Image (tube, helix red, strand yellow):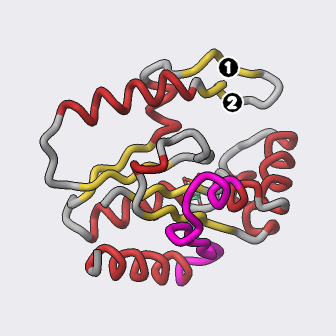
Amino acid sequence: PNILVTGTPGTGKTTLCELICKRTNNLFKHFNLSKMVKEENLHDGFDKNTSSHILNEDKLLDHLEELFEETDRDYGYIFDLHTCYFFPERWMDLVIVLRTDNSILFKRLQKRGYAPKKIKENIEAEIFQVLLDEANESYDKKIVKELKSNSVKDMNNNLNQILNWIKNW
Ligand code: DAT
């Protein structure tokens, strides 16, 4: 199966994806897409206003499609990105939306060195559940799962739920 892990920056997407790969003995290939966008220049430059790269969805999709064609694969993909509306629906078998309480998310983003404005924007996105709505609007609601990611205990619970889901797939 292919899994999309989405959520506001700092909610724990990359950490969770890496744990899934580790615990399944690399049955999955993890695409850290914001990293890929920067490394492969799949953006339209850096926006000083939002202190982030402007994602070019078409370039990213083209790049991913090339990778898809390359392999006769016996593993699934895990996509890890803070937005999710533009992927072909058929690519995804499970869509995880990680959620974190504001005060906890605030500290994580501060620790990451984000500018106050960028922290504020991300906290607001989390308050207005932007990613959850985006996921529910872009995919069949039956495959969209909202998971709390406030603590290490939450992370382990989420990991076990997903491992169980994979086992039954
Ligand atoms: P993302 O990929 O969503 O931006 P991350 O995996 O890089 O997030 O995590 C950001 C930081 O927060 C990192 O230092 C690990 C920590 N973290 C993530 N999820 C957590 C959780 N559920 N409990 C405690 N710490 C968590």
Q: Measured along the vertical axis of the image, is residue 169 above or below residue 126?
A: below
The residue under label 2 is 52
Q: Quadrant of the C terminus?
A: bottom left
x 74%, y 22%: residue: 47
In the image, 161 versus 73, the foreground residue is 73
The amino acid sitting under disc 1 is Phe
- Side of 21 relative to 117 (left or right): left
Which residues make up the magenta segment?
Answer: 134-153
Helix or strand or loop: what does disc 2 sit on? strand
Percent coordinates x, y for residue 122 in the rendering: 78, 49
The amino acid sitting under disc 2 is Ser
Percent coordinates x, y for residue 62 in the rendering: 41, 24
x 38%, y 44%: residue: 31
How many other residues sit within 10 Å of disc 2, few (<14), some (14-19) or many (≥20)? Answer: few
Q: Residue furthest top?
A: 45
Percent coordinates x, y for residue 6 in the rendering: 57, 55
Tell me which corner region of the image, top left, top right, bottom left or bottom right, holds residue 106. bottom right
Q: Are marks 1 and 2 in contact (CB under 8 Å)?
A: yes
How many other residues sit within 10 Å of disc 1, few (<14), some (14-19) or many (≥20)? Answer: few
Percent coordinates x, y for residue 23 in the rendering: 27, 71
Q: Measured along the vertical axis of the image, is residue 114 above or below residue 153?
A: above
Query: Label 1 vs label 2: CA separation?
Result: 6 Å
In reply to whether residue 57 is colored magenta, the answer given is: no
Task: Tell me, for residue 46, which label it has, or none.
Answer: 1
x 61%, y 28%: residue: 55
- Side of 142 relative to 160 (left or right): right
